[in-house]
Image (tube, rainbow, N blue to C red):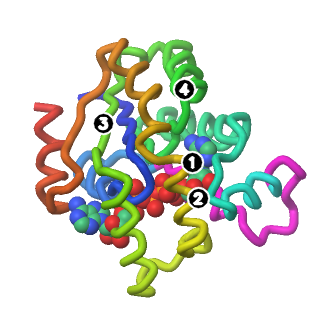
Amino acid sequence: MKKIIILLGIPGSGKGTQAMRLVEHYGYEHISTGDLLRGLQGRKDLDQELQEAVDTMLEGKLVKDDVVYRLGFDAIRDALDAGRGVVLDGVVRNLAQAERYQTFFEELGLSDDVQVIEIALDDKESFDRLKARIASGYQSRPDDTEEILRERIKVQGNEALEPIKAFYNKHDLLAVVDGRQSMDAVHEAILRIFL
Ligand code: AP5
């Protein structure tokens, strides 16, 4: 079983939903840069870099790579040091991040312990799903307004995912599951990757 599971997917593809199920199934640590950033919101003790990152997140744009590394590397090291694998949810969102994380795993001697899984969904379906989440009022989030949602999908939609997928394909690390299926079916499809 690979120690590092990287979930790729556009906003609303189901990364968070499937990460929680994988964490339950394998006893891994769930690391979501979105959750880590939202956890910083409203704190008074943030330095300028982190405050800017929270503001950027609230605009639906990608935060700077250095902030992602600052949050992600420590969280990953802590989990691995505690003997737990990790499910990385939205931690990789551009080519530079994909490359840097792969180097990070090489430095840890874990480059053979990585499985990348794309939960594939088209931009329109993702928009409809997240709009439904807003309308339901359930799981309300500060970056879940219709306006920010449009920006998130514009900046982080399938076009932006292409170079990341090409990188992982080149390294033979990428598996793809169909995100249009039910949550249970997506979960089963992910588990089959590890058989
Ligand atoms: P983040 O919190 O990761 O937001 P996101 O990528 O937009 O993802 P969501 O949580 O909205 O969607 P999801 O794919 O997890 O789907 P979910 O399971 O929730 O990031 C927030 C922000 O932080 C980013 O916009 C960016 O600013 C910043 N950021 C984070 N990481 C970064 C990085 N590495 N670099 C730079 N910036 C970064 O499901 C969505 C909905 O669909 C739910 O209502 C769910 O119930 C439903 N659903 C799930 N699966 C199914 C299914 N199979 N069928 C039907 N409905 C489903």
Q: Are marks 2 and 4 in contact (CB under 8 Å)?
A: no
Residue drawn at 67 percent across, 57 percent down: 57
Q: Identify the amino acid type marked 3.
A: Ile
Q: Tell me the distance, in whole angstroms, between the alpha carbons under discs 3 and 2.
A: 24 Å
Q: CA distance from mark 4 to mark 3?
A: 16 Å
Residue 155 tag number: 1
* Labelled disc at residue 151: 2
Residue 38 on the magenta span: yes
93 to 29, vertically: above or below = above
**Residue 117's disc number:** 3
**Of callouts 3 and 2, which one flags the residue occurring earlier in the amino acid sequence?**
3
Q: Residue at x 10, y 31 (%)?
A: 195
Mark 1 and mark 2 in contact? Answer it, CB < 8 Å.
Answer: yes
* Residue linked to disc 4: 95
Ligand 1: image quarter: bottom left
Ranked by sequence position, the earlier of labels 4 and 1 is 4
Q: Residues within 10 Å of mark 1 (few under 14, many from 20)?
A: some
